[in-house]
Amino acid sequence: MKTLIFTATYNEIGNIQRLITEIFKVVPTSDILVIDDNSPDGTGQLLDSLSDKLKNLKVIHRSGKLGLGTAHIEAMKYAVDKNYDLLITMDADFSHDPKYLNEMMKLSELNDFVIGSRYIKGGGLGYGFIRTAISIIANFLARLLLSIKLKECTTSFRAFKKDLLIKILEQKVSSTGYSFFFEIVYIVSRLTNKLTEFPIYFADRVDGVSKISKQEIIRGVITLGKLFLQRIKLKR
């Protein structure tokens, strides 16, 4: 399958070069797309330098922090426009280990959607107590309120077949930040039955700082409530 691996960056100069190197070691025939939101730490300039040397690395620069969800939507459109069979999305901070990419690609042969899961047997999470508790609660509420059968709803380590991407892009997606991730799983669960999860260990970031703010958590709760009401309305 013609595969595109995507990550979004904002101030990831300490991680991105090593991540790209590791991805190409595992899946050397794939292409990588990085969308950078005008990182002030020089991530964008580093990416341009790398893309001059690596023909399979594509870089898109945006004018500023336009939202993580909008970057993922842009990557989906890019994958469809460039006729990729499979889009894999992942974090830029080594929370998602590239060693799992081959397994994800193999599972994608029989599934429209694959997600790396921290919450099934064999999976794990490297956060501290507070962030672990927030993550567990968020996933539990998403599964309960949105009737999602997957144990994992929020991490961005995912694979999408092209036909599914086309269907997703026809939907109205309201989230632009981190709540985008469980909204997409909710949409996917309504569009296909061919979805699965496999265990991963989710490590805390190697370099830099987390970008999830309290405001983003509040927006996530609001989005979850809106999607729940939408689901009830559709059910009726």
Image (tube, rainbow, N blue to C red):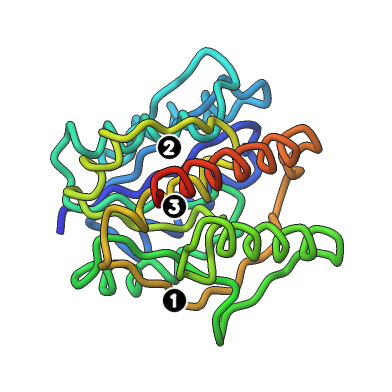
x and y, in percent, of residue 89 in the image: 41, 50
**Relative horizontal placement of residue 190, taking residue 205 as reference (left or right):** left
Q: Which amino acid does label 3 sit on?
A: Tyr
Circles 3 and 1, Cβ within 8 Å, touching? The answer is no
As helix, strand or loop, the secondary structure at mark 1 comes to: strand
Q: Which amino acid does label 2 sit on?
A: His
Q: Earlier in the sequence, mark 1 or mark 2?
A: 2
Q: From mark 2 to mark 3, how far is it between C-alphas?
A: 16 Å
The image quarter in which residue 84 lies: top left
**Relative horizontal placement of residue 56, taking residue 69 as reference (left or right):** left
As helix, strand or loop, the secondary structure at mark 2 comes to: helix
Mark closer to the observer (2, 3)? 3
Q: From mark 1 to mark 2, how far is it between C-alphas?
A: 21 Å
The residue that mark 3 highlights is 186
Q: Earlier in the sequence, mark 2 or mark 3?
A: 2
The residue that mark 2 highlights is 72
The residue that mark 1 highlights is 198
Q: Quadrant of the N terminus?
A: bottom left
Circles 2 and 3, Cβ within 8 Å, touching? The answer is no
The image quarter in which residue 192 lies: bottom left
Q: Which of marks 3 and 1 is nearer the N terminus?
A: 3
Residue in the image at 49% along x and 62% along y: 147
Residue in the image at 42% along x and 72% along y: 197
The foreground one among 85 and 14 is 85
